[in-house]
Image (cartoon, rainbow, N blue to C red):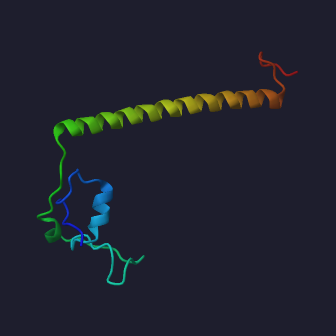
Amino acid sequence: MRPPFGKCLSRPWTVADFTVHCDTFPIFPLRGRNGPRQDYHPRLANDDVVNLVVPVPDRKIQENIAAEVARRRENARRLRDEAARIWDEAKRQFEEELLGLESGGRAL
C-alpha cells in the first residue's frame, strides 16, 4: 500500500510523486472501477476541496523559481532572435542565387 500523500518521504514531493499518488485519493478519481477509461471525466465539488492543503514553497524558493523562469524566457527569446537572423540570411542568399543577383542588387 502506498503511503498517504505528503507523508513518509525523506525528500520534497515532486510532480511525478503527486501524479503517481493522485489516484489513491477520493478527491482525485482518475480511474474507474475497471481501470482507466477514455470517457471518464472526474468532477470536483466545493466540498471536495475545502480542506485541501496546497503546499507553497518558501519565499527564497519562489524567488529562485522566478529567476530560473526569467532566465529560460530570456534564453528562448535570444534563440528565437538568432533563428530569425539565420533564416533571414539564408532567405536572402537563396533569393540572390535564384534571381541571379549580385551583391549590389542588379541582375546578371
Task: Give the farthest residue toward the bottom.
Answer: 34
Does residue 64 lie above or below 93 as drawn? below
Q: Residue at x 34, y 74 (%)?
A: 41
Q: Residue at x 51, y 32 (%)?
A: 79
Q: Residue at x 44, y 32 (%)?
A: 75
Task: Give the farthest residue toward the right.
Answer: 108
Residue 44 versus residue 8: which sits nearer the camera?
8
Task: Give the farthest residue toward the left.
Answer: 51
Q: Residue at x 21, y 74 (%)?
A: 26
The C terminus appears in which quarter of the rendering? top right
Does residue 7 lie above or below 48 as drawn? above
Residue 106 at what x, y percent from top left?
82, 19
Residue 103 at what x, y percent from top left?
77, 17
Residue 96 versus residue 107: which sits nearer the camera?
96
Residue 49 at what x, y percent from top left?
16, 65
Does residue 31 lie above or below 66 as drawn? below
Figure quadrant of residue 82: top right
Does residue 50 lie above or below 78 as drawn? below
Residue 105 at what x, y percent from top left?
77, 19
Apparent side of residue 58 relative to residue 72 in the rendered image (left or right): left
Apparent side of residue 38 relative to residue 104 in the rendered image (left or right): left
